């Protein structure tokens, strides 16, 4: 395991963090480890966009094309069912 040291944390911030940790029945260290674990488990916006881009490239048609095709189908079905 690596050690991380954070400098220049304001006394107010340290007090709030320590209070939040105590409210959860945790030490400040375990509370901060939990915060870090949750943060690194969430993908960044760039990572989400990259994954979405990869999925879009795998698809044969864009969502816009699929929506347009569905609308055309509904429009032609509506035109056929409308009495003249």
Image (cartoon, helix red, strand yellow):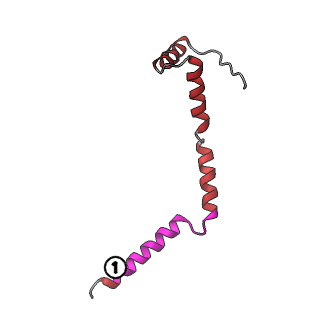
Please name the residue shown 59% across and 16% down the image.
9
Q: Position of residue 4 (x, y in %)?
A: 69, 22
Q: Which quadrant is the C terminus positioned in?
A: bottom left
Of 13 and 3, nearer the camera is 3
Q: Residues within 10 Å of mark 1 (few under 14, many from 20)?
A: few
Please name the residue shown 39% across and 76% down the image.
74
Of 74 and 35, nearer the camera is 35
Q: Which quadrant of the view contains residue 23?
A: top left
Q: Is residue 4 above or below residue 58?
A: above
Q: Secondary structure at mark 1?
A: helix
Please name the residue shown 52% across and 15% down the image.
18
The residues colored magenta run 58-79
The secondary structure that most of the magenta stretch takes on is helix
Q: Is residue 23 above or below residue 55?
A: above
Which residue was labeled with disc 1? Answer: 78
Q: Position of residue 30 (x, y in %)?
A: 58, 22
Q: Is residue 18 above or below residue 78?
A: above
Q: Given the current orientation, which residue lies at the most extreme front position?
A: 25
On screen, residue 65 versus residue 46, left or right, reads left
Q: Position of residue 14 (x, y in %)?
A: 55, 14
Q: Is residue 66 magenta?
A: yes
Please name the residue shown 57% across and 27% down the image.
34
């Amino acid at each position: 395991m690596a050690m991380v040291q954070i400098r220049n944390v304001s006394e107010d911030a340290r007090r709030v963090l320590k209070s939040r940790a105590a409210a959860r029945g945790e030490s400040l260290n375990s509370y901060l480890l939990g915060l870090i674990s949750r943060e690194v488990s969430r993908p960044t916006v760039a990572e989400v966009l990259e994954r979405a881009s990869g999925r879009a490239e795998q698809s044969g048609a864009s969502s816009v094309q699929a929506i347009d095709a569905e609308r055309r189908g509904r429009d032609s079905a509506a035109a056929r069912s409308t009495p003249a």
